[in-house]
Image: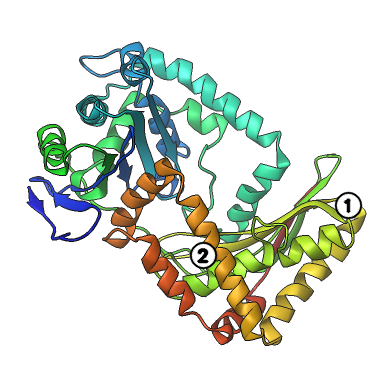
Amino acid sequence: MKNMGTLGKPYEIFTLSNGMRAVVRQTDSPVSYIGVVINAGSRDEPADRQGLAHFVEHTIFKGTSSRKSWHISNRMECIGGELNAYTSKEETMLYTNAPAGHAERAIELLSDIIADSRFPSRELDMEREVVIDEINSYLDSPSESVYDEFEERAYAGSALAHNILGTPESVRSLSSTDCRGFLDRHYTPANMVAYISDPGDPARLATLLEKHFGALGFPGGTPQRATPPPMQAFDDTVSRDGHQAHTVMGYRVFGRRDPRRFPLFLLNNHLGGPCMNSRLNQELRDKRGLVYTVDSSVALMSDTGLLQIYFGCDRKDIPRCRRLIGRELERLASDRLSDRAFRSIVNQYCGQMIVSSDNRENMAMSMGKSLQFFGHVVEMQEVDRALRDVTPEQLRDLAAEIASSPLGCLTIC
């Protein structure tokens, strides 16, 4: 195990003897946050095994050689903690939180379920019904499913096109062998990062990581991913006899490492971010009362991404809402923002980052994810500097580039 030269930083990065990376931040919190970020998600499933990454995330807690399902779930909960997981298109995270002083308990448990999950058939059969119910429940919520159906079209011809949950048919076909095979291929030292945010001594915590994770070594490597083909413009409507129409308009953009991501973050936040003063909220809701909800969001992958704008409204108002959204994007692409207005945009976003940094669990997760995807811990000060280096011209040029790109639009009503 070696330290990766983090002298003077509020964290330390280690590489275990098997090549797995880990980052440890010593805190003054009474709560310990420990997890593992795996560089694998639904994008990395075999074409005929849709939903496998998510199903593995559900069933990895169902038993090892030394623990049954109940023992795994009780291990952290009996001390007031939590063991949980989530899956996205390109990542899976297994994570814990607990009162400080129980770090080895969490580290050993995470190591055991990764190294030795058995995926017993009886447990899989029961969990299958849970996941299928999750799929059906999700399909009953068009405000959520419209995003995945939009991505099916935006990423057509690639593994990013299918949704994370899979289908009832694909989930019913998944076996213990499928689950263990996916884990062995992707939960490898080179493909995982451990993170710890804990008041304990970093050197001791690194020793515990080496003790429990250092011997892991499955065949496999980092994912080999094909970049999706360029998006073709589309404009589709799916009728489901709903009360309200749910629409997503969107554009394909670049991946998470592109330097243009910083003007994109500012553009997105100003256009339709979570605050009530976003341009779209002002124009569509406050001034005209056309929508209950309108927002924009950015989802960046390793090699591509989407800027998506969602609104829910009466069917008759869809054309007008679309025109207003297009007009706001055109204004950002053509009008020059004053220095004062642009500083306000930057200050608002940077202030939101400060507020979000008060969530210790999210900050611990971000520490692990940034080491996984950027090779170092991306601190808030680094992002703040990059955002303040953006110019009004860069934001305007990016808005013009996006506005001139092929547009996808999907409505479920």
**Amino acid type shown at disc 1:** Arg
Residue at label 1?
315
Name which of mark 1 and mark 2 comes first in the sequence: 1
Residue situated in front as seen by the camera: 379 or 112: 379
The quarter holding residue 370 reads bottom left
Can the viewer see residue 313 in this picture?
Answer: yes
Name the residue furthest right. Answer: 316
Residue at position x 74%, y 80% from top? 331
Q: SS class of the residue under badge 1?
A: helix
Residue at position x 73%, y 79% from top? 330
Find residue 413 and report its horizontal and vertical position in percent.
81, 46
What is the CA distance from the residue labelled 1 to the residue labelled 2? 37 Å
The quarter holding residue 360 reads top left
- 377 vs 304, left or right, is left
From what the image shows, is residue 82 above or below residue 379? above
Residue at position x 61%, y 78% from top? 342
Residue situated in front as seen by the camera: 285 or 93: 285
